[in-house]
Image: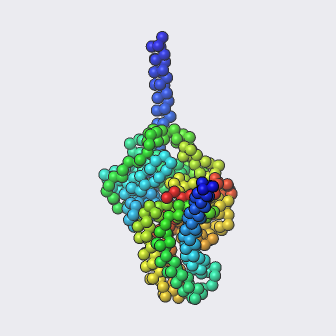
Amino acid sequence: MPRRIISVILIAAVAALVVYWWLTAPTALALPAPMRGPDLANGQELFNAGGCSSCHAVPNQPDRLRLGGGLALGSPFGTFYAPNISPDAADGIGRWSEADFVNAVMRGISPAGTHYFPAFPYTSYHIVKVDDVRDLFAYLKTLPPVSGRVRDHDLPFPFNIRRNVGIWKLLFMEVRPFMPDAARSAQWNRGAYLVNGFGHCAECHSPRNFLGGVITSQRFAGGPNPEGEGWVPNITQKGIGGWSEKDIADFLETGDMPEGDSASGSMRPVIKNLAQLTPEDRAAMAAYLKSLPPVDGPTPPKRKEAGG
Amino acid sequence: MKRILIVAGTLILGAGAVMAQQEIAVQQDNLMRSQAKSMYGVILKMTKGEIPYDQKAVDAAIASLEADVAKIAKTFEVNPKQDVVNATYGASPKVWQNKADFDSKIPPVQKAIAEVKGKITDVASLKAAYTAMNDRCTDCHETYRLKLK
């Protein structure tokens, strides 16, 4: 009798493992053949829209194009260290194929076929066009190689199990291409594409649930800074309803706010990137942001005692 | 009776300490607000054409900035361990974790101010001066200034 119970438990355990393995399997994207050669100017524009250098540039040095990585990104789940994405053959992405890169950016899957942690915002990038990612890859290849492998992420169990990210993706990542809204202008659609895709604005400007998934109903409504202290502002019309479309476009270029202040914190490096965009792209992002309906976000603590 | 006096005394002292800390936070906040007034209330508004260009006001704003920036290191010497009540922005605790690095961000601001002082004559030169100074302000704000709500 006990032997039968043991075998039942064993079979159940094996079955559970099979289901887990099946649910968490990374599904790579089959890459269609390119229809055209790479457009480096477009790649550069998307590099700046995506703010790649904010995380991947080597910290504490002035050159935002040295993508050797190393920046520590705090989170409630542990500390992530941005990897080297310079074209260095040994430590960066110099040996990657185009398909490797597209799968990394759009699906969060490494060339070895493992899940990346969603600190890398592929949860936004999945909506972008494959050709745009190809252009970005071609542009990254023109930047200087930086040697040096970045240390591993510092995550406690169970968050360090990459396979678990497969479940997380099932729960919080809805893979679908960008769908233009025919009722809106081309400018608005371009803005929606940049803000929700490469710009990945919602990744910081939205509250997250206890598993780190964005709370969709409060997208763009701000919340506590996932990196620790402070508050990320509400950028729906609830938060910046007083800003005109031009105010928003100007802010994205200079960081200057209409109420007479200047962006600070993590928004500062974002502005440095956005300042490099074409004025048309900044205006498009502003047009889209200005159209976001007012949504209440979480309430900031009344009075925060800063720990010494 | 003695015990009551001791308890009451401790409470009063405690409340006094809390108030003193709040006062330090307020002083720090006021110093930064004074600079914001010069930078954004005067200079930025003029560069945007929201108020007319006024040489006297520009020179006064630069002089005031110069004086305020010189006070930052001293005013931020003590960690008040609390934010100003209902403030939108505050100082990050990192200021006091890396005070030497925080202080090292001040001389570049002073240098930027010294370089533009007396050389601003019109909106165009004011614009260039604003960017040169503000970039050094934000070098520090990137790490040490916190949005609280």
What colour scheme was applied to this rendering of the protein?
Answer: rainbow
Pick out the residue farthest to the top.
A1
Name the residue: 46% across, 39% down. Answer: A158
Point out residue B117 in the picture as x, y percentages from the top left corner: 48, 85
Q: Is residue B149 above or below residue A153?
A: below
Say which of A142 and A252 sits in front: A252
Closer to the camera in the image, B63 or A12: B63
Could you tell me if residue A276 is visible in this image? no
Using the image as rendered, state which of residue A5 and residue B102 is in the foreground: B102
Percent from the top left, x then y, of residue B90? 55, 64
Of residues A87 and A5, the one drawn nearer to the viewer in this rendering: A5
Classify residue A186 as left or right of residue A140: right
Q: Residue at x 48, y 16 (%)?
A: A5
Up-down relation of residue A77 to residue A234 (above or below): above
Residue shown at 58% from the left, 57% from the top: B6
Find residue B58 and report its horizontal and vertical position in percent. Answer: 56, 85
| Residue occupying the point 31% across, 51% down | A90
Q: Residue placed farthest to the front in the image? A: B1
Is residue B6 visible in the rendered image? The answer is yes
Residue A15 in the image: above or below residue A82: above
Residue A292 lies left or right of residue A308; in this view the side is: right
Q: Position of residue A239 (x, y in %)?
A: 65, 61
| Count of marks placed on residues | 0
